[in-house]
Image: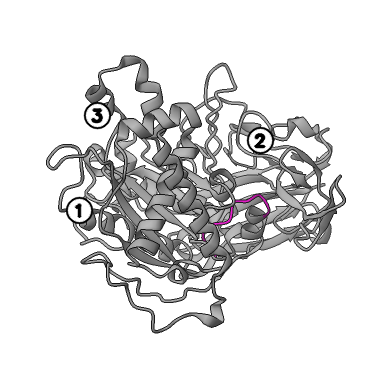
Amino acid sequence: MNKNKIIALMAVSLLATSCNNSNKTKDDYDKNWTPGAHALDNADQPIIKNPQGIYNDLGKMRASQGKAGLPQQGKANILVVPVEFSDDKANDYNYTSGAKNRLNGIYFENDGSEEELPSVVEYYNQSSKMKLNLSGVVTPVVKLENAITDYIYDSIVFGTEYVVKEIVDYVYDFLFEETETYYLKDFDADDDGKIDAIALNYSWFPAEVYYMMGYPDMYEFVSTLLTTDVYFNSELGNDSPVNSVSWLSGRSSEVSGIKFDSHTAINHTARQMGVEDYRDTTGTYDGFIRSPLAHRDMMDGYISDHNPFTKYQLGWIEPTKVVASKLNDQETYTLKPYSESGDVLMLSPEETGIYGEYLMLEYYTPTALNAPDSETAYLFNLYGNVGYKESGIRVYKVDARLVEGISNTSVAMADGAPDFTKEITLDNGKKAKAYYDYAFSNSGYNEYSDSGIFEDYPLIEELSKNGFNRHMTDTTFALSDDDLFLEGDSFGKDGDIDGFYTNFALDGNGDGELKLGLTFTVDSLSSDEAKVTVRRAK
C-alpha cells in the first residue's frame, strides 16, 4: 500500500469520526436538506425520510456485541451501492447500463415476470406481515479508487475486513461528503450517527479474476475477497460510518438464470437485522456438514419463509405458549397455515420467553413464501432442494439460553433474560455494558469454549417424526414429506400414544434429565387449518 493511499484512508477515517461526533438528533432532522451542487446525476432519493426503527432485544443483544444493523421492526432504508474497480472496462466484466434496474428488481421492486424471486422488500413485507417496512435506493455505480488486484493484495496482507472497510469508507466519503448526494439521517433508523445498512454489490466473480490474473496460487485469496458475507462495526472498526455491510456479487443472476436472483440479498438482510445464519459450515462430523433445518429455511438453504424462532426473535409473531406445569390434562389447539397466519405453538416444561429451551410447532403448507408453484420453486429446483410439497406439522427444537460477560472471550451462562442496562466493572475500574449472546449456535463447535462452555447444542434444529436430526448428529440429508408430522402422528408417549420421542428431554442441565413433560398428537389437517392436541405426559 502506498503512502498516499494510507494518508487518504486516515483522512477518511478522521472525517467519518468527526461526522459521527457532530450528528444531529432525530428531532433536528433537516426537512429542507437537498443534494449538494456536486450530487450525482440520476440519483434517486429514498421515499422514507428520517426512518424510525424499533430495535428489540435481538437488536440490543447484537449491539452489545458491536453488531448493530437494521431494526427488527418499524421503518428503515437500505443503501444499495453497485461498485466497480478502477480497472473495470466497458463491455468487459463491469456493470452494464442495466445494473441499476437489476439491483432495483432484487432489492425493491421487479416487473412480475416469470423466473424471478420476490424482491427483498416484497419478501419482508410478506414475512413480517408489514411489521418491518424496508425501503431504500440503488445508487449510481461508484467507481473505486483502486484496481481489483490492489484490493486482493491488501486482503492478503491485512485481511478481507480491512479491504471491505477501505471500500466502505471510500463509498461513504464519496456519496455523503464529497458529492453530498445523500443525507445520512435518511439511512439511520436508530439515530446513532451511522448508516444502518449498506449493500455493496461488486461486479466480478472469483473465476473471472483468476483467469484474468493467471496466477493459480492466487485463487484462494481471490475467492476470499470476492465471497458473499456480512460485516459489522465490530469488524470494520469503531470509526466506521456504517453499522452493517452486505458484500456480494451484483451479477448473481447471470449464474442462477433467475432474472432477479434475490435469495442471497434476502439472507444477508436478515443477518443485518441480527439473525444468525443457521448453516453449519464446520464439517465437524467426519467432514460432513450437519443439516439443522434440512436446508429448507431462508437462513439455512436460502429458500422459503423464516422459521418461527426467527420471527419470534424479530417480534413478528407471538406464539401460543403451552406450559407443562400449567396444563391440567390436555387441550386441543387450532393452527392456521403458518406462512399466512404466523400461528405457532410453543411447548415448554416451565414458563419461558425467548431465552430458554422449548419446542415450536407450525402448520407448514406449500403456500405463500413456501409455495412450490411460486417463483421460489425455481430456486428450489436450481439448488436441488425442492422443499416440502405436502402439508404437515413442522417441529423445531430451540435452545436459546444466553451467555453474559464483558466480551466474547469472557462469558458465563446467564440466568434468564438479558438486562441491557447492566454494567460490569472491568479490571481497570471502568464500567462497561454487559455483553450478551446465545450460548449455542448451529456450528459444530462452541465459540465460547474458552470460557468453559463446551457443549455444541444447536440453537435451532428441525425434528423429523422419525427421530432424525436430534442434536444434528446425522450428517447432511434432505428431509422428505415423510418426516412431517401428519394426521394421526404423535410426539412422545402417553398411555396408548406412542411416538418416537418418548420422555423427550431438553438439554438444560446437560444430563438429559429436564423432561419436556408434554406430548402431542396431530388430530386433523385440512387446507385451512390443523388441529393438535397437547397432553401432560404421565
Q: Give the secondary structure at mark 2.
A: loop
Task: Tell me, yes or no, if residue 487 can be seen here.
Answer: no
Q: Main secondary structure of the magenta part?
A: loop
In 3D space, how far apart are the residues under numbered discs 2 and 1 (Cα atoms)? 42 Å
Q: Count the labels in the image.
A: 3
Which residue bears the numbered disc 3?
208
Q: Earlier in the sequence, mark 3 or mark 1?
A: 1
- Farthest residue to the left: give it: 91
Are circles 3 and 2 on residues that touch, CB within 8 Å? no
Q: Secondary structure at mark 3?
A: helix
Instruction: Say the numbered circle drawn on residue 114.
Output: 1
User: Looking at the image, which residue is at 36% across and 68% down?
Assistant: 182
Is residue 330 among what the camera can see?
Answer: yes
Q: Which residue is mark 2?
A: 500
Is label 3 or label 2 in front? 3
Instruction: Name the residue located 77 percent from the left edge and 53 percent from the top edge.
Output: 434
The quarter of the displayed image where residue 257 is located: top left
- Label 3 neighbour load within 10 Å: few <14, some 14-19, many 20+: few
Q: Amino acid at mark 3?
A: Glu
Q: Position of 130 compared to 34: left or right?
A: right
Viewer-proximal residue among 147 and 249:
147
Magenta segment includes 320: no
Can you tell which of label 3 and label 1 is closer to the viewer? Answer: 3
User: Three-letter amino acid code at disc 1?
Assistant: Glu
Nearest the eye: 510 or 212? 212
Which range of residues does the magenta coloring cover?
Answer: 64-72
Query: Which quarter shows the N terminus?
Result: top left
Decide: is 414 above or below 368: above
* Residue 125 placement: quadrant: bottom left
Q: What colouring method underlies this structural image?
A: one colour
Amino acid, disc 2 = Phe
